[in-house]
Amino acid sequence: MSRDVIQAVINLVPELTDFGIGIDENGRGLDKVQKKAEFDKNQSMLLDSSESFEKAVAWLKQVEKIKSFNTHRSSYGLKHLAEKEIGYITNGVFIAAAIHSGFKYKINPDSPNVRFNMSEKSLKILEKA
């Protein structure tokens, strides 16, 4: 079930991989074929992350949605906050879980990270917990 849900998020954001948006260092030093292979491998790893995805979705239920984007935290920082409670997850898993959970998202240009409409107040409460 989760694999299908993750695939639905990938359909919305085709550049999403386990790493985040794209691949590490944008595949610098790789030729076109190698970049495609690395991208496909990273997307496959994301699709195989059902257990981490479910934990992230459950954790995100504690986070309040707001109208604007939180400019203080990116997906990478947010995943570290979630990890304190749920264990290791990748940036891509966190992004997929947040999008699936109904958070609006804004992709950071030239970055694997994403911004969300997550309440800083609710995140600070989770940080102190």
Image (cartoon, helix red, strand yellow):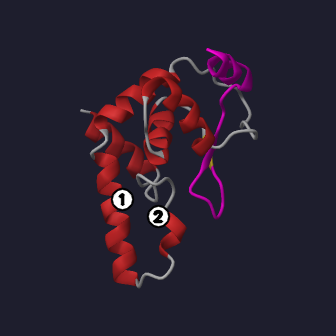
Q: Left or right of 69: which side holds 79?
A: left
Name the residue carrying label 1.
42
**Magenta-tinted stretch:** 107-129
Q: Left or right of 38: which side holds 108?
A: right
The relative height of residue 28 versus residue 21 in the rendered view (above or below) is below
Q: Name which quarter of the figure residue 56 lies in.
A: top left
Q: Position of residue 71 (x, y in %)?
A: 75, 41
Q: Which residue is outermost to the bottom?
A: 31
Work out whether residue 75 or residue 82 is closer to the camera in this orientation and state it.
Answer: 82
Report the Cα–Cα distance between label 2 and label 1.
7 Å
Q: Amino acid at mark 1?
A: Asn
The relative height of residue 86 versus residue 113 in the rendered view (above or below) is above
Name the residue carrying label 2.
23
Badge 1 marks a residue whose secondary structure is helix
Q: Amino acid at mark 2?
A: Ile
- Neighbour tally class for label 1: few under 14, some 14-19, many 20 plus, Cα within 10 Å: many
The answer to whether mark 2 and mark 1 are in CB contact below 8 A is yes
